[in-house]
Image (cartoon, rainbow, N blue to C red):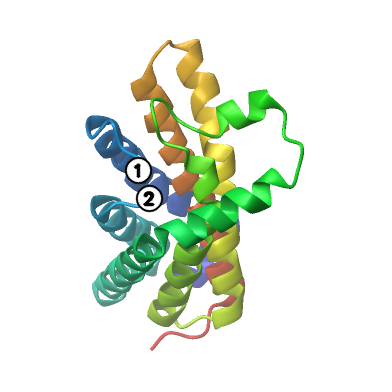
Amino acid sequence: MFQNVSFKKYLLTSAIGFGLGGALWGWELHSSIPIRYPLTALGAILIGIFGGIGLSVWFRNWKIILKTIGFGLLGCGIGFFLTGIGIYPLFLSGTWFLSIFPWPDTIIDLIKLSPSLKIGAYWLNFAVAGILIGLFYALALKTKFWPMIWRGGTGFVLGSLIGPIIGNLIGNAFNSLFVSYLVTFSVIGIILGLFLAWGVYKNLKPIT
């Protein structure tokens, strides 16, 4: 049963699920270069499917697994769609907020991906999407809403800022833009998965 799974194992499987979805998402984006907006429809599908599996596989119940995948697809789909509609207000607001701080040019260069994806500037878009993703997973797994909402938003924001830094550093070491995209979105997925798994494990209600 799920209750017999350790916290570390649950974090690991969730990180693997979301990380795999993120890696495939990065592959898709790299194949679509030049691209300016990272929250794509295929990205929502990949995160929703693989992330849902990672969060629910330990329940060992196909109904719960399929329900989690379905709600994950809805949450990611709606979240990515709404942030796409509000792309410019969210992007401009996020860019303005980041401009308040005196970031070194090195950091600014590292939170974007060549040739045109300023991924770090979309952190507010990721926040809104993450909030909705957390909400739908809370509905699927019958957890408390607020812990999942803030973890979903926070995890996706941190991923969007940390992911490209790690991705660029590793990609530059291999002199490969493909590696940069793959690692960037794998890390984004992993961080989101870790935060959501944390929320589920600590706030799970009995599932009937």
Q: Residues within 10 Å of mark 1 (few under 14, many from 20)?
A: many
Residue at x 32%, y 60% (from the top left corner): 48
Q: Is residue 189 left or right of residue 42?
A: right
**Residue 157 shows in the view:** no
Q: Which residue is outermost to the bottom?
A: 208
Q: How far separated are the C-alphas under marks 2 and 1? A: 5 Å
Q: Percent x, y for residue 65?
A: 30, 69
Q: Percent x, y for residue 38?
A: 37, 46
The C terminus lies in quadrant:
bottom left
SS type, badge 2: helix
Residue at x 59%, y 77% (from the top left corner): 203
Residue at x 48%, y 63% (from the top left corner): 130
Rendering quarter of residue 99: top right
SS type, badge 1: helix
Q: Is residue 90 left or right of residue 98?
A: left
* Residue 168 to residue 137: above or below: above
Q: Percent x, y for residue 96?
A: 63, 51
Q: Which residue is mark 2?
A: 17
Q: Which residue is mark 1?
A: 20
Residue at x 28%, y 52% (from the top left corner): 46
| Front residue (pair 133, 129) | 129
Q: Percent x, y for residue 56?
A: 38, 66
Q: Amino acid at mark 2?
A: Gly
Name the mark on residue 92. Answer: none
